[in-house]
Structure formats: structure tokens, C-alpha cells
Amino acid sequence: MTMQHDVDNQLMSLGSYSPIEWLLDAGHLQYGDYEAWRMGEFDILEKHIHLPKKELVSNLEKAERFCHKLGLVGEVQPFSGWDQSNTSKDLVISQSPALTALLQKQWTRQEDAPQMDLFMDNPSVVTENILVEALANRHWETAQKYVNKLYQQDPNHAQLHGYEDLVAFGLHTDDPVEDHIDIIDEERTGLEQEIVPLARQLLQQKSRDYLAPAWQRIAQSLEGHPYNVAYPQSHASYAWEQMQSWQQVQHSIIGDESYTHHGELLFRLCLAYYYQRNREQSLIALIQLIDLKASHADSELDDTLENFLNRYPDDNFKSVWQRFMDLEDEQPFSIFPGWLLLNEPGLLHHIESSQADSIKNASFYAALQLLQAKQAKDSDRELSARKALNDINPLLLTLYLKKN
């Protein structure tokens, strides 16, 4: 993915572009670390950004050039603390002024950029901006105070009732969710269909910070609940995913003993490993997902699986997938697990025996046996494994010989 693509995506979904939001979306910054920084648990955010500084700066500079090309306006966005002990303190992003300047801007379209004369002439604009900050910082009582003030200053304000709903829902998130799957699912549906669109409309880039406690509340209430096919999104992993809390996504899935039988959970696990920079385990989970689906759709690609594969963010995998799809002679999808392993032979060193045993796909098993025989330098075993692979599909043996 290019930085231009990422900027366009943010503009389309949130109406503006924020480098911090990009870091969270791309998995270069874990939301839990970002939240801990806002709560004052550590001082400098840069130490928790998982991207080499040279690459980070290069990407941010590319994004800035693209923003200028689009005619966007960059405005400095100071970050204050969320805890009572640091609410009035500007937090430190980096000890480098240049990197701080790159990360601290929010880019908006010219027509959406705040005008200073409007601020001076219209006190309700100032009130609204303070209200937005209070909602993003989860200071519900302060937000309620400024909703009341906005009522007095501009009782016909077009977004007044929307802000009032956000304050009410924010206060609601302080209460526990009743431990019943129907009630939890109803709350999740209301959050997704009503509150999320409203928060994105009114708070834009700050909507994630406002919404995180609501998703966390639902995720915590669902911990320990097994996956239910009747409620596929009422699993803790789904709620953690909305926050990009990938470590919690992983833990909630691994803790569900049935996860290898559910494509949705396996795909979330793929993403969780990927965004935690564990590419090998991500691909192994993806092979488990493909194996699950391939066993039910021999030569036809299941629509759900195609959606998963198209959403998988790893560019190298996409290249392998595209080469398979572009083969002149169409191949049965059941051989794709073997094709993937032969294109990613390094996975051999990361596949645990229990994982290998759980994958029943014949092409994967034959490719695995061949790679293991080659690694052991067992020529007789390798010759036998080559024959077994050829019997399954000659194209796979051709691929192996080409790469070895």
C-alpha cells in the first residue's frame, strides 16, 4: 500500500488525514501503547512506534507532499493527557522537533479548515471545538457543560442533538453491560449503526479515541464467551479488532478452543499476528483458514474466502495469490496451500507440529514433507516426497524444482 492510498482512505472515511491515525491503522503503533501514553504511563510516544525512524520519516514526508498536492491544509494538533493528573499537559511525541512536526499535524480540505475570523466572530465555534476535544478526551462532565453552553449560544445549531447523543452515550459507557449475549449484541449493533457514524461525522479523526471505551466495554463483557455462528460479531476478538488492539484480539481467539473451526476467527488471528509483526504465524493461520475453506470448496473458491484473501494486507502474499490466479491453466483451489508453502519455504522453520497436524490439505502436507526432506538432506526421502507431490499436482513439483 502506498502512502497516497492511505491518505485517500482516511479522507474518504473520516474527512481528514492524521499521521497518528495512520500509525494506528497500519499497526505501527498499538492502540494500547497510544492509550497508555495519553494516560501518562510513559513520556515519549516515539519509543513505541514500530517502524525504523528513516522509513517512518520517509513515509510521513511522502504523505505531506501528497497532502500539499491535494491542496489540503495542515494544522498542528497538540495532544494532551486523558488522566486527571495530566489533562493540562501537552504530551511529548518525539524528542526530534522535525519528527514531532510531521506527526502532530492534521490535514483537512481547504473548505473544512477553521478560519480565525470565524473563531473571533462566532463564540459557538470555539465552544464546539472545546466540546469535540472533551468528547475525544472522554471527559463526559466537561462535554456536558459545553453542550449546555452551545445550547445557550446557538440553540439552532445543526449538530447540537448529535453532540448531546454522544455525551449521553459516553456517560453510558461507564456502566457495565449485562452479561447476556442478546443484550450485548443489541448494544454492539446500536454502537455500529448509530454511534460510530455519528462520531465519525462530528469528531472525524478524534472519533477513534471517543469510541475506544465503548468497544473495550463490549470486548471485556464478551471475554470467555465462545464463538457463536449465530452472532459472528459478538465475540471479544471483533470488538478488540475495532480498536486495533491486536494483542487482545490474539489472546481472545487463542482462548477459544473452537477457533480453528471458524474462518472468521482464523482471519482475525491472521490480522492480529500480521499487525504485531509476526508475519510467519500470520501466514500459518492463513493456511489454516484456506485449509478449512478448501476442504468445503474443492475446485471452487468460496466467496467468503475470496473476501478474506483480498483483505489480507501482506503485499508479498498478494503477489503469490495473484500469480496463482493468473496461471494460464486454471488449477483447483485445493492445491493453493501447497503453492503458498512452496513460495514461502521459510515457514518450515515456524510451523509447530500441532499446527502441521491440524492442516489436512494434501498439497500442503506433500509440500511440507518435501521441504523437510530437503532440509534433512535425506535424498531417498526427498525423491519419494517429489513423487508424492507430483501425483497430487505436477505444477507444484515444477514450482519446487524451479525454486531449488
Image: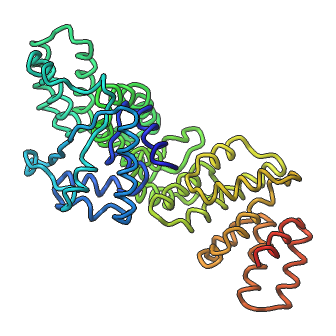
Question: Which of the two residues, 267 or 133, is positioned nearer the viewer here?
Answer: 133
Nearer to me, 135 or 177: 135
Q: What is the x, y in percent for residue 345?
A: 68, 74
Q: Is residue 125 left or right of residue 24?
A: left
Q: Can you give x and y, in whole percent of width and height, for residue 75 in the image? A: 23, 37
Q: Which residue is at the front of the view, 25 or 231?
A: 25
Towards the viewer: 62 or 360: 62
The x, y position of residue 245, in whole percent, is 39, 53
Could you tell whether 16 is left or right of 282 in the image? Answer: left
Q: Is residue 196 above or below residue 62?
A: above
Q: Is residue 25 left or right of residue 384?
A: left
Q: Which picture quadrant has residue 13?
A: top left
The residue that appears at 20% across and 7% down in the rendered structure is: 156
Q: Quadrant of residue 185?
A: top left
Q: Residue at x 36, y 51 (%)?
A: 60
Q: Is residue 142 above or below residue 65?
A: above
Name above or below for residue 121 compared with residue 62: above
Left/right placement of residue 275 relative to residue 262 reads: left
Q: How is the image coloured?
A: rainbow
Quadrant placement of the C terminus? bottom right
Residue at 28% from the left image edge and 37% from the top image edge:
206
Q: How many marks?
A: 0
- The quarter holding residue 290 reads bottom right
Q: Residue furthest top?
A: 156
Residue plotted at (83% across, 52% down): 298
Q: Position of residue 161 (x, y in %)?
A: 25, 16
